[in-house]
Image (spheres, grey):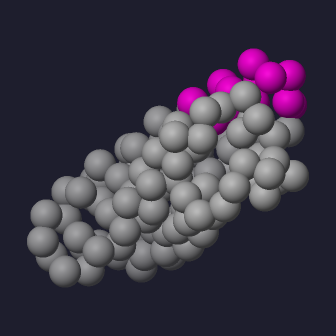
Amino acid sequence: MNVAYWIVAGLLALFYGYAGGIKVLRTREQLQPMMAWVDSTPMPVVRTIGTLEVLGAIGLVLPPLTGIAPWLALAAAVGFVLLQLGATAVHLRRGDRQIALNIGLLLAAAGAVWLAAGWA
């Protein structure tokens, strides 16, 4: 793995570790000011998304760091691409056109896929 991967993966891991952690730990009322979509999403789904985000963040960093199943980093990055495609669709379906963060995360995850696959 190269330096570019570690920069992209580290930033993604920090973001998703935090975002996933708050989805797992906070109540619907605490999440609503920053995530309007939680009002129409069952909390078990919100908690599942949060858990997947935390696991994905770990998957971006731990396997390449330890050398154990480093292909999991590629799987985590692909998972984040799919997550952001779904998140963008949810925002657009709700009439929310503020998707710049989603597009940025999608591009960063796609970059992590590219770097983790060794195409760089």
- How far from the left and from the top, in percent, is residue 30? 78, 58
- The foreground one among 31 and 12 is 31
- The foreground one among 65 and 91 is 91
- How far from the left and from the top, in percent, is residue 73? 30, 60
Looking at the picture, does residue 15 appear above or below residue 67? above
Asked whether, in this view, residue 112 is left or right of residue 45, the answer is left
Asked whether, in this view, residue 24 is left or right of residue 117, the answer is right
Q: Confirm whether residue 49 shows in the render.
A: no
Query: Magenta includes 91?
Result: yes
Q: Main secondary structure of the magenta part?
A: helix
Which quadrant of the rendered structure holds the C terminus? bottom left
User: Which residue is found at the position 35% from the left and 53% from the top?
Assistant: 76
- The foreground one among 62 and 35 is 35
- Hey, which quadrant is residue 6 in on the image? bottom left
- How far from the left and from the top, in percent, is residue 45? 53, 37
Query: Magenta includes 16?
Result: no
Looking at the picture, does residue 80 appear above or below residue 71? above
Asked whether, in this view, residue 1 is left or right of residue 49, the answer is left
Looking at the picture, does residue 88 appear above or below residue 19? above
Question: In this picture, which residue range is highlighted in magenta?
Answer: 86-97
Q: Confirm whether residue 36 shows in the render.
A: yes
User: Which residue is found at the position 42% from the left and 51% from the top?
Assistant: 52
Q: Residue furthest left?
A: 68
User: Which residue is found at the position 60% from the left and 41% from the top?
Assistant: 43
User: Which residue is found at the position 19% from the left and 80% from the top?
Assistant: 66
- How far from the left and from the top, in percent, is residue 1? 29, 73
